[in-house]
Image (cartoon, rainbow, N blue to C red):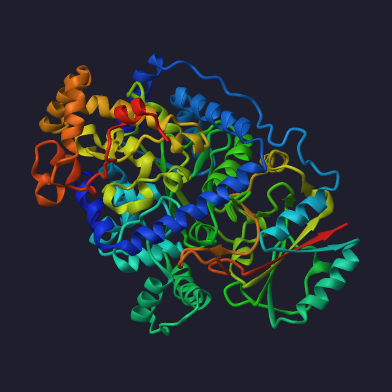
């Protein structure tokens, strides 16, 4: 008998003496709570509160112009594999291990938690290694709740999804919060549309 | 790293309070701050409804554990994950040993995981000559110090800024007045090299979704994302009770766990891992192993009262509010999990005799039950373990006799009054501690300060 079978056998020996508990159904969260009519605005509020920065532009053209301007302050960039070609900044492209700036295409965002949704197909290292990270998100991909976002993502799961909710932080040294410990110390959400 | 055993609790706790006052102040300050953040975060939500929902989902999982274990296994396998089962720490470590041999692993980065502490992963790997590096900043600090974690969420909360300055000065030559930012930058640089050079990343798992075979990991620094993304092999150790039925269930659990632990709306980074790197993906591990670990959990499931502890999400909220934990931090408990949750898990996972006297390391004030996000009735379970300890003869004979004597006195008002009056003349300073029973109670405690008049006389004469 394998470890698997012995573990399952022990579980099955006990469960008849435990009263079946039903699953309570979907998580209701806020119910009629602070569900904002302005979902991107709610995302901005939550993401900013966690130390992130939000830039809102009306069109892909304006996003491209903003990125070009922002990227001018950096020497090299690493870019996501699914970033539209016209949004790739005019910088020397470098591996994420050494790039000063990372630019990723976001799968979406979550307003209630202030989270960016990042897909492994866009490249994990660009999402994590450069000290500054810009993530493009289409405004229609900003979900109000985590439940909505997970439902959307679950229909097409890559090997890894990362939810990034602000810059990397730690309070492990003397309980004092510092940013940029392992992940990026500066994270910008570029909301397009 | 020496962890001690629960049997040494009273002595170690007394030693901490008497001889290491800086630990008490650091732990008290950190836990009060965690708890204040939790309170603020809970005030923003319909917290009772959230806690009910989380309790009910976990209760459902535990009462259908076989079904969800099999579903998770099937989904993980379909996702290309290699699934292993381990009944004990030895079996879990043997799985790791086989991975190390097969892939020729020399360098390991570790994401913070209490289960790997429970299993003794670091000692095992070091014993096999494998370089292993903790990458959570707090875990890194205590690894350099050679200490076990003292808190589920904040492993180094017993250490001050000056402790870290001294440590980094010794290891990296950084100035003694370095800012926390400068120290963190030093660690970032040292650990960045470790991430990129590692052959294997090891993590735990906060949740494992049966429906999709997805492992969910919560953190703030990015070290878990890096440990599970940069090295070519990832091994995740997951307790068998960590299952959730559906991916939708994460929406409640990711939020309440963060709000209970640190008061954040969600952990700064959440990794949802559904297998190894796929065709068309440009990075990520080629091989992912999930080790489903029992190590006493099925024994705990068989306990008629204490089994509800299997709902625990390891948020640390009960540690943060516990007036007993706050005095010493986690080290004196001599067990991976400390505070109220540790005191109820230890008898289930280790056996009651080995876990003594942890169920007694509580004032039964009930604060832990008030903050538990999955509503584990911790004080009831503590009382249950105490009753079991008395039945099993695991409490000192003097204490049993003392309790019997007390019961006899309490039934006789005159004798009770006389004894109460007599207590006021015990010469504590002059050897009162040597008295039977009283000595046992006062040996590790400050002598009680009694009011000049007993309560029943105050009552009779009128309380001002």
Q: Is residue A179 left or right of residue B239?
A: right
Residue A127 percent location from the top left of the image: 63, 63
Residue A153 picture location, percent across and down: 69, 43
Q: Position of residue A178 (x, y in %)?
A: 55, 69
Residue appearing at x 28%, y 47% in the figure: B333
The one nearer the camera, A60 or B11, is B11
Return the residue nearer the eye: A145 or B226.
A145
Q: Residue furthest front?
A: B461
Q: Considering only vertical position in the picture, is B398 above or below B14?
A: above
Q: Quadrant of residue A2?
A: top left
Q: Is residue B425 or residue B366 the one in the foreground?
A: B425
Task: Mark yes or no: residue B42 visible.
Answer: yes
Where in the figure is residue A135, as x and y percent of width and height? 73, 62
Residue at 43% in and 34% down: B366
Tell me: residue B426, above or below residue B128: above
Asked if residue B166 is positioned above or below residue B400 in the image, the reply reads below
Residue at image x 40%, y 36%? B365
Q: Quadrant of residue A98?
A: bottom right
Describe residue A54's horizontal placement relative to residue B104 as left or right.
right
Residue A83 horizontal side relative to residue B179, left or right: right
Quadrant placement of the C terminus of chain B? top left
**Residue A6 in view:** no
Residue at 35 percent across and 58 percent down: it is B24
Placement of the N terminus of chain B among the 4 image quadrants: bottom left
* In the image, residue B132 above or below residue B262: below
Figure label count: 0
Q: Quadrant of residue B43?
A: top right
């Amino acid at each position: 008998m394998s470890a698997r079978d012995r573990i399952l056998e022990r579980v099955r020996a006990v469960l008849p003496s435990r009263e079946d508990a039903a699953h309570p159904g979907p998580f209701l969260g806020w119910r009629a709570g602070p569900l904002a009519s302005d979902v991107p605005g709610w995302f901005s509020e939550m993401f900013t509160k966690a130390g992130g920065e939000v830039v809102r532009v009306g069109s892909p053209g304006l996003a491209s112009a903003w990125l070009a301007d922002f990227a001018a302050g950096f020497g090299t960039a690493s870019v996501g594999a699914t970033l539209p070609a016209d949004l790739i900044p005019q910088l020397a492209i470098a591996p994420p291990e050494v790039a000063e700036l990372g630019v990723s295409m976001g799968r979406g965002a979550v307003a209630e938690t202030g989270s960016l949704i990042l897909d492994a197909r866009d490249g994990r290292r660009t999402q994590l290694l450069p000290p500054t990270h810009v993530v493009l998100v289409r405004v229609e991909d900003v979900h109000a709740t985590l439940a909505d976002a997970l439902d959307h993502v679950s229909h097409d799961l890559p090997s890894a999804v990362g939810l990034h909710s602000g810059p990397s932080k730690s309070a492990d040294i003397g309980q004092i919060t510092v940013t940029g410990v392992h992940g990026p110390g500066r994270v910008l959400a570029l909301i397009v549309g | 790293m020496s962890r001690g055993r629960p049997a040494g609790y009273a002595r170690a706790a007394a030693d901490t309070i008497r001889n290491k006052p800086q630990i008490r102040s650091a732990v008290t300050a950190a836990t009060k701050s965690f708890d204040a953040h939790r309170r603020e975060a809970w005030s923003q939500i319909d917290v009772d409804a959230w806690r009910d929902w989380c309790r009910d989902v976990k209760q459902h999982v535990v009462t259908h554990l076989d079904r969800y274990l099999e579903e998770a296994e099937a989904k993980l396998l379909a996702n290309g994950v290699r699934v292993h089962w381990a009944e004990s720490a030895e079996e879990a470590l043997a799985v790791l040993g086989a991975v190390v041999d097969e892939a020729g692993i020399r360098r390991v980065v570790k994401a913070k995981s209490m289960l790997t502490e429970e299993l003794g992963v670091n000692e095992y790997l070091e014993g096999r000559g494998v370089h292993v590096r903790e990458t959570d900043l707090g875990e890194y600090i205590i690894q350099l110090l050679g200490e076990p974690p003292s808190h589920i969420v904040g492993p180094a909360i017993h250490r001050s800024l000056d402790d870290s300055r001294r440590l980094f000065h010794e290891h990296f030559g950084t100035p003694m007045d370095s800012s926390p930012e400068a120290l963190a930058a030093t660690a970032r640089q040292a650990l960045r090299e470790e991430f990129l050079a590692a052959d294997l990343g090891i993590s735990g798992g906060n949740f494992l979704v049966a429906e999709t075979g997805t492992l969910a990991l919560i953190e703030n620094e990015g070290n878990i994302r890096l440990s599970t993304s940069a090295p070519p092999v990832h091994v995740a150790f997951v307790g068998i009770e960590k299952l959730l039925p559906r991916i939708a269930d994460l929406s409640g659990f990711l939020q309440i766990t963060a709000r209970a632990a640190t008061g954040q709306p969600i952990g700064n980074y959440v990794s949802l891992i559904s297998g190894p790197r796929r065709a068309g993906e440009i990075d990520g591990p080629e091989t992912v192993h999930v080790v489903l670990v029992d190590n006493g959990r099925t024994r705990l499931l068989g306990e008629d009262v204490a089994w509800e502890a299997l709902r625990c999400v390891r948020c640390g909220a009960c540690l943060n509010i516990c007036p007993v934990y706050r005095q010493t931090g986690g080290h004196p408990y001599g067990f991976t999990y400390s505070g109220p949750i540790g005191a109820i898990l230890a008898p289930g996972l280790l056996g009651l005799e080995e876990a003594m006297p942890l169920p007694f390391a509580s004032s039964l004030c009930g604060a832990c039950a008030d903050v538990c996000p999955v509503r584990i009735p911790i004080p009831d379970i503590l009382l249950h373990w105490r009753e079991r300890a008395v039945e099993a003869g695991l409490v000192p004979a003097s204490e049993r006799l003392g309790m019997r004597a007390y019961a006899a006195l309490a039934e006789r008002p005159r004798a009770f009054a006389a004894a109460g009056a007599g207590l006021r003349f015990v010469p504590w300073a002059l050897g009162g501690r040597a008295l039977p029973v009283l000595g046992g109670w006062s040996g590790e405690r400050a002598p009680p300060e009694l009011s000049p008049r007993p309560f029943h006389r105050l009552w009779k004469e009128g309380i001002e």
